[in-house]
Amino acid sequence: MAEGNGEVVEEMANQKSGEGGDGERTQDYSKLLEYGLHKMVAGRLDDIYKTGKLAHSELDERALDALKEFHVEGALDVLEQFLDSNLEHVSNKSAFLCGVMKTYRQKIRATQQGQPAPAATVQAKGPDEEKIKAILERTGYTLDVTTGQRKYGGPPPNWEGNTPGNGCEVFCGKIPKDMYEDELIPLFEKCGKIWDLRLMMDPMTGTNRGYAFVTFTSRDSASNAVRELNDYEIRNGKKIGVTISFNNHRLFVGNIPKNRDRDELLEEFAKHAPGLVEVIIYSSPDDKKKNRGFCFLEYESHKAASLAKRRLGTGRIKARIALDVWNCDIIVDWADPQEEPDEQTMSKVKVLYVRNLTQDTSEEKLKESFEQFGRVERVKKIKDYAFVHFEDRDNAVKAMKDLDGKEIGGSNIEVSLAKPPSDKKKKEEILRARERRMTQFLQTRIGLVSSVPSFPSMSPQHAGMIPGPLPGPMRVPSGAGGQRAQGMRGGPMGRGDYGK
């Protein structure tokens, strides 16, 4: 409805506010008008102030500016949805209102594109508030609700220990969409002390997204949760999946120009998101001056990597890189997670991982170079990297320290201790998840499907635990980039794991 239809819009506003004209206004009403809000929008917002669900001091400029951008009817609809929302556990009401506005725009956009509108948020079955209140009173924890997630705890009351590190968080998938903290917290509490629980929400429907992250205060508790609750039947016929969640700091970026070096890539990607600490590239075996067409971006935190993934993978920044900078359509995804072996395991390793080798460097040449430090049992070269097996660990460490960065065969090699072979089953699961994600990308890119589910901020090892089917294998037409895309994620990402 156009803003010019003043009489119709004003009548609707009066119906929603339950009064005609301006009526008795608070002193904040004039502030809203001075800020530039339409008088009907300002009036409806003032009515909400009177209910006590929102105070003018709780709104920041970001929310008011966003509200000004709406036409009158849209702004009134947004405020009505905000008023109907359960704000009991919302600590930042200004951010929550911004979330309601964002969801409203998404629904309008979906309707314009002919997609079926999702169920209204207010129709979603909510949690048992009495049970949640009892849990909060018993534990002393807080519950903070936004349009995107519900966060319980973090840190526990009067906590004096360290912040939980890697291995303390579990990912819980296949959660029924109408399940909330009142059922999840008692279940996970049995496994150990909870630091926080984050239930991810779908603002389009008001239900949860089917997954949550639970951080415990210790690794033992997290391991216990995996052991006790993975494949646990939480409801009749409904089993959840629980696995250790590793904060992924690394992104995979494919389809980059092969003539760009590390410094050029670092300069360009650092412009678009903060926290970039390293760019990892792999030289082409045929031409060491060129990269292989992909790189890895290492960020200081999972949060920074998640922000970079959103910015680089969609919208204006992706379009700018495609059109103005490199004239190519980059692919951005989470890098496959790497579990680092513990110190005790690595203290027994006597195999070296050697990378950045030229095509002319043979296994015999490598053995000759490394054997000056002690007996080498065997050398296995794979493309531009190799594994050197020493008989004695001390000799392997000496060779690593002396030869790392030295020139062999016209290239400065990199030498490190190789990781022991990882669990074969886990590697197969990661590979299947990788193939599903690449299939989704290709289907979207060549227009074979109109809608592919998206799960932001999710590391690859969690993809199999999302409710609902993922697209199956497909044939990629010639010219669609199928073979190239499938091979982009190949090659080592760090220290290689050597075969038995």
Image (cartoon, helix red, strand yellow):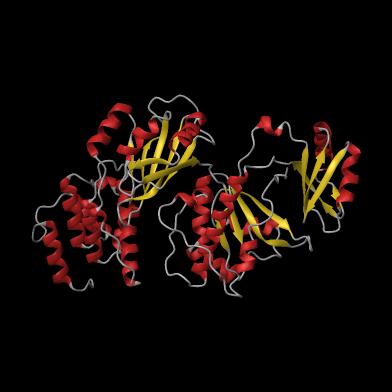
Q: Quadrant of residue 367?
A: top right
Residue 99 position, x and y percent, is 33, 54
- Quarter of the N terminus within the rendering: bottom left
Image quarter (top left, top right, bottom left or bottom right) of the C terminus: top right
Residue depicted at 10% across the width and 52% down the height: 24
**Is residue 224 rendered to the left or right of residue 111?**
right
Q: Nearer the viewer, residue 41 or 229?
A: 229
Q: Position of residue 279 (x, y in %)?
A: 65, 52
Number of labels in the image equals 0
Residue drawn at x 47%, y 64% is: 315
Q: Residue at x 18, y 73 (%)?
A: 5
As drawn, 383 above or below 340: below
Percent of width and height locating residue 240: 41, 44
As displayed, is residue 397 above or below residue 263? above
Residue 59, image x and y in percent? Answer: 29, 49
**Foreground of the two, 343 or 294:** 343
Describe residue 340's horizontal placement relative to residue 500 as left or right: left
Q: Is 21 left, or right, of 83 in this rendering?
A: left
Q: Is residue 357 left or right of residue 12?
A: right
